[in-house]
Amino acid sequence: MGSKTLKTLLMATSILATAGFAHAADTTLTIESWRTDDLAIWQEKLIPAFEAKNPGIKVKFSPTPPTEYDAALGARFDAGSAGDIITCRPFDKSLEQFKRGNLASLNDLSGMKNFSDVAKAAWTTDDGKDTFCVPMASVIHGFIYNKDAFDKLGIAIPTTEAEFFAALDKIKADGTYIPMAMGTKDLWEAATMGYQNIGPTYWKGEEGRAKLIKGESKLTDPEWVEPYKVLLKWKDYLGDGFEAQTYPDSQNLFTLGRAAIYPAGSWEIGLFNTQAQFKMGAFPPPVKNAGDACYISDHNDIGVGLNSKSGHPEEAKKFLDWVASPEFADIYANALPGFFSLNSTAVKMQDPLAQEFVSWREKCKPTIRSTYQILSRGTPNLENETWVESANVINGTDTPEAAAKKLQDGLDSWFKPAK
């Protein structure tokens, strides 16, 4: 048989094969994300679990580096080339995409019933009428501590503000460890791990946050100033030169065993597990007085939505319904300890530190960071100003009252509560 004849025969066989299986062609869904770190988890765990249950639908995880994601995604939306599934930032960035018509409303997605209103808050319109992303994960704030240090010094886990400062005093007096690893150079650390970590205890979480948005309270009110008074007291326990200490410096001080307590976001768990050579534990923000209600910042961090111009809306909705399922929640949360499922079905964490953080949901009231919804849309931006003032208070360059007044004056300059 000549090579020409063989080529023709092969071509014919190929055409016949294609014709025979045309009806079974797979649909491929593409996921847009900034989580480049999660590529292996998607490829090895999540996508195979979905594809096994959904023959005919293939999924491709296609991340963009975090610092480039927002601009690149916006450009792809404009060009009509964005993926089918869009990983959603919390609050305004995703809300803007929904308002532009780039994200579809998911009100009719059956899996949405698996999430509370607080879980959906980061991806719901101001009027509460439309939710446009499936909540995937939150991060929880608290304190990670060196168990060896606590055992050595005979310190019990503090549950009240007084016990917390007594523990810090004991660590400082011993001199082996820096009591607490946190710097103010990068600003955001002071606000996120400081003010937003302990603050909900004083402004009563969602109750206080809602009052601020409605204009029923101000940042100069006692419940908003008091966390700054507490933060001012942290100054004595942060070690020499904390004003020049960056976020990576703080991480290193703790994981190298040089500091006893680390004001934390749960996203640290994975990294700390690989770096720390000592046993770690965690405790929630101490309450003011024994018996007070406990509050935690359980902050919506990541969701996933539907490109309203996807060529495969039905398949994409199948995928989103799966993301809303307890099965997805279990795989995802355990693959990424510290990024906690927002699903109403509780996920049992295999990582003990992650399980400690998530267990606080059973005894503490969850809230989200006070500056994230509605209140940082103008200039000056309340979130960024809170970074600056939190650092200023700890550094001693602004009093708690002065910091609160600057923040409220900035907010008053552009924000008018809806009547």
Image: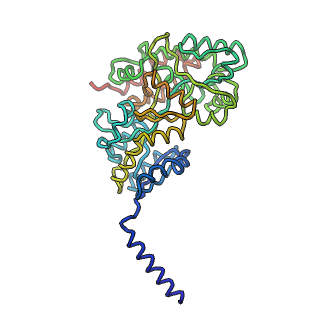
**Residue at 38% over, 18% down:** 218
The residue closer to the viewer here, 243 or 209, is 209
Measured from the top left, where is residue 211 in percent x and y? 35, 20
User: Seen in the image, is 408 located left or right of residue 68?
Assistant: left
**Looking at the figure, which quarter contains the C terminus?**
top left
User: Measured along the vertical axis of the image, is residue 180 above or below residue 39?
Assistant: above
The residue closer to the viewer here, 270 or 198, is 270
User: Seen in the image, is 382 located left or right of residue 182?
Assistant: left
**Residue at 71% over, 14% down:** 174
Q: Residue furthest bottom?
A: 2
Measured from the top left, where is residue 223 in percent x and y? 43, 14
Figure disc tally: 0
User: Measured along the vertical axis of the image, is residue 31 above or below residue 178?
Assistant: below
**Residue at 36% over, 28% down:** 414
Which colour assignment does the render follow?
rainbow
The residue closer to the viewer here, 358 or 221, is 358
Q: Is residue 79 visible?
A: yes
**Residue at 33% over, 53% down:** 314
Kindly indicate the quadrant of the structure image that contains residue 134: top left
Measured from the top left, where is residue 85 in percent x and y? 41, 49
Measured from the top left, where is residue 182 in percent x and y? 61, 25
Kindly indicate the quadrant of the structure image that contains residue 395: top right
Q: Is residue 380 visible?
A: no
User: Seen in the image, is 318 located left or right of residue 296?
Assistant: left
Q: Residue furthest left?
A: 419
